[in-house]
């Protein structure tokens, strides 16, 4: 198949859906057709009740996503960029951020520009030890425009976020973990194995409880503490109305594995 129809690979491994950005000849750079295919594949996995966790990675060993397509970006003027590419990438990235299913990034190589911005939308991030991360847009006379300016300052100390964006410097996988951008760094050879093991572990939990937990975390992060605590109180009440909550407690008391069905 041509790149235009095969930029995203969508696979299922039991309860885990795997999305692979498959443009290795461009180091998996993001353009509008690729983003639209990514959105369609995400929608497919979100609608599949058998899929409980979604993993995203890049094709090849060099790059997760090496950024946007610079030649395409250079061809645009402001209004066209705002109405076309920027509108699409913001919508797609927000879809990942708002997904009710846990998302895990398997960062197999360079995650630069849009690659780091995509990483920032994911719940958990495992990164190959050889990978490099960064927001180098300032070197092009630009700044991160796919949510990076706002998500980064909410996830790492402000002075470090500014340093990354002001200098455009790349950081190592170990530095990304120390900064809190990634959960852990692992050898590239075992990255997918460890990512899938983590995904399978999470997939054994109640999908309903995970969905409501994600909403409590996501919504609460944008609220004052008092409102967030009240929101948490309401959400845990909903959880206790579920079959899964009582199945989990009963299984613990009966010393057996719980069988969660998402109800």
Image (cartoon, helix red, strand yellow):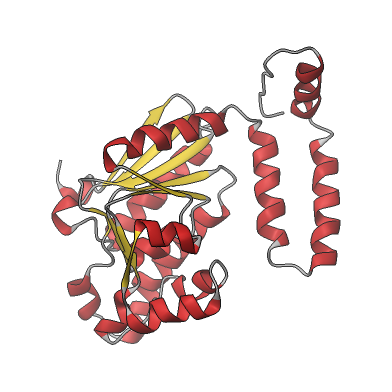
The C terminus appears in which quarter of the rendering? Answer: top right
Q: Residue at the spot x=21%, y=73% of the render?
A: 70
Relative height, residue 129 to residue 168 (above, below)? above
Please tell me whether residue 49 is drawn above or below residue 114 in the rendered image.
above
The quarter in which the N terminus is drawn is: top left
Residue 122 percent coordinates (x, y): 49, 53
Return the x and y of residue 115 as percentages of the image width and height: 34, 61
The one nearer the camera, 161 or 72, is 161
Q: Is residue 201 left or right of residue 212?
A: left
Judge from the rendering whether residue 6 lies leftward or rightward of residue 43; answer left or right: left
Give the quadrant of residue 203: top right
Which quadrant would residue 77 be assigned to in this image? bottom left
Q: Nearer the viewer, residue 159 or 237?
A: 159
What's the residue at 70%, 37% (across, down)?
A: 209
Report the label total: 0
In front of the other: 178 or 230: 178
Residue 85, given in percent of the width and then of the height, sits at: 34, 70
Left or right, 197 with respect to 130, comes to: right
- Residue drawn 80% across the image and 47% down it: 235
Left or right: where 259 falls relative to 56:
right
Image location of residue 214, percent across then percent down: 65, 48
Q: Residue at x 46, y 45 (%)?
A: 104
């Amino acid at each position: 198949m041509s790149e235009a129809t095969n930029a995203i690979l969508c696979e299922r491994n039991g309860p885990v859906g795997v999305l692979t950005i498959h443009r290795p000849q461009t180091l998996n750079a993001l353009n509008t057709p690729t983003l639209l295919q990514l959105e369609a594949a995400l929608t497919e996995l979100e609608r599949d009740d058998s899929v409980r966790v979604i993993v995203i990675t890049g094709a090849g060993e060099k790059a997760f996503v090496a950024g946007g397509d610079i030649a395409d970006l250079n061809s645009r003027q402001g209004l066209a960029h705002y109405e076309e590419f920027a509108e699409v990438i913001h919508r797609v990235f927000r879809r990942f951020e708002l997904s009710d299913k846990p998302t895990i990034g398997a960062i197999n190589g360079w995650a630069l520009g849009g690659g780091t911005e995509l990483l920032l939308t994911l719940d958990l991030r495992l990164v190959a030890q050889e990978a490099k991360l960064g927001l180098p847009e300032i070197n092009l006379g630009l700044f991160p425009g796919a949510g990076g300016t706002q998500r980064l300052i909410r996830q790492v100390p402000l002075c470090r976020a500014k340093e990354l964006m002001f200098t455009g410097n790349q950081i190592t996988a170990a530095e990304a973990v120390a900064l809190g951008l990634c959960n852990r760094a692992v050898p590239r050879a075992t990255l997918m194995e460890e990512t899938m093991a983590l995904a399978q572990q999470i997939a054994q939990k109640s999908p309903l409880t995970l969905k409501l937990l994600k909403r409590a975390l996501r919504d609460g992060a944008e609220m004052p503490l008092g409102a967030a605590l009240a929101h948490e109180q309401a959400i845990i009440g909903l959880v206790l109305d579920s079959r899964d909550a009582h199945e989990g407690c009963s299984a613990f008391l009966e010393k057996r594995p719980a069988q969660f069905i998402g109800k």
